[in-house]
Amino acid sequence: MKRVLILGGTQEAALLAAQCTQLPGVDVISSLAGRLQRPTLPAGTVRQGGFGGVAGLVEYIREQHIAVLLDATHPFAADISWHAAEAAQVCRIPHLMLVRPPWEPTAADHWLAVASLVEAATLLPAIAQRAFLSIGRQELPVFAQCTHLWFLMRMIEPPASETPLPPGLVLLQRGPFAVADERVLFQTHTIGALVSKNSGGQATAAKLLAARELGIPVVMVQRPALPAGVQVADVAQARLWMQQYLI
Ligand code: NAP
């Protein structure tokens, strides 16, 4: 029996876990950060919560006799990716990063690329009074000082009660989203700009199509740097890569 550790929190990670649990002689452990109260649980064994940095992850890999480490975390979850790369090197086990391709603007888009959410918050007052913040809930406090703007803030679960928030409305929704629904959201709330991380993927791309159709500018936060190492772009490629070590 060979054991694979999938660092998850994404749809791709859940899909891979479901496929790997079907492989004979393979034991799958998925790891979630434990941020959500009610996460969608992948197939196989699931553990939740941080490992305690690189040292904790190394210890876990050794204790659990992990044979292969697959990092299928979100492209903006950079800390865990750096920890995983280092831990795999220390433990001398194969390590793969599944990194979805970023979204690319077309000629019909009006994107303003920024390096961080702090930069987005600085730029925003110059382009819109009402903005759609599609960035999850962890980094909303970055916008708390934008008290002269109004925000539609979409996330899966509500922020903690003590979280400083800017003026606006919290909308609890889990993707995937349809373009027609996204268009209605923009129009209902007279949104003048969208703030998004360049997460890539299909599940949340509809907001970009709706913004394009309506001529709404998008403040697009660029991705953080990831460690060097073997990367694939989708689940099918990740499964192929894994099979060489698992079968
Ligand atoms: P992060 O900044 O890279 O990680 C911060 C710390 O959280 C890590 O050092 C690690 O703690 C723990 N951690 C993160 N992912 C983990 C995992 N899969 N299993 C166990 N521990 C994990 O990550 P983040 O941006 O807070 O994101 C947390 C999780 O949410 C990720 O797994 C990611 O896939 C998912 N997610 C993130 C975003 C986003 O925009 N950042 C969006 C959608 C989903 P220790 O150092 O103690 O090990």
Image: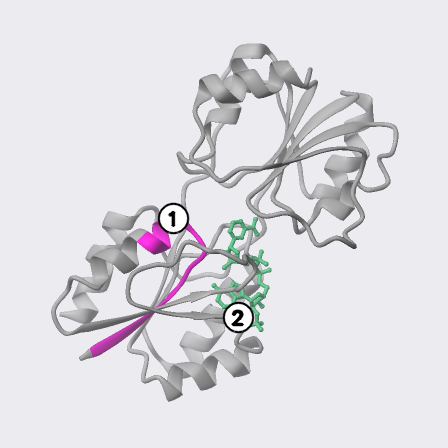
Figure quarter occupied by ligand 1: bottom right
Q: Secondary structure at mark 1?
A: helix
Label for residue 49?
A: 2
Taking 3 as reference, is 219 left or right?
Answer: right
Identify residue type, mark 1.
Gln
Identify residue type, mark 2.
Gly
Q: Is residue 212 located in the magenta-colored stretch of the structure?
A: no
| Proximity of marks 1 and 2: CB atoms separated by less than 8 Å | no
CB at mark 2 closer than 8 A to ligand 1? yes
* Residue at image point 48% right, 29% down: 104
Question: Which residue is disc 1 drawn over?
Answer: 11
Q: Nearer the viewer, residue 110 or 169?
A: 169
Q: Percent from the top left, x then y, of residue 25? A: 14, 74
* Residue at image point 59% right, 50% down: 224
Task: Please state the extent of the stretch shown in magenta in the rendering.
Answer: 2-14
Q: Secondary structure at mark 2?
A: loop
Q: Nearer the viewer, residue 213 or 138?
A: 138
Q: Is residue 5 located in the magenta-colored stretch of the structure?
A: yes
* Residue at image point 48% right, 74% down: 86
* Residue at image point 25% right, 57% down: 18
Residue 105 can be seen in this image: no
Q: Percent from the top left, x then y, of residue 29? A: 33, 71
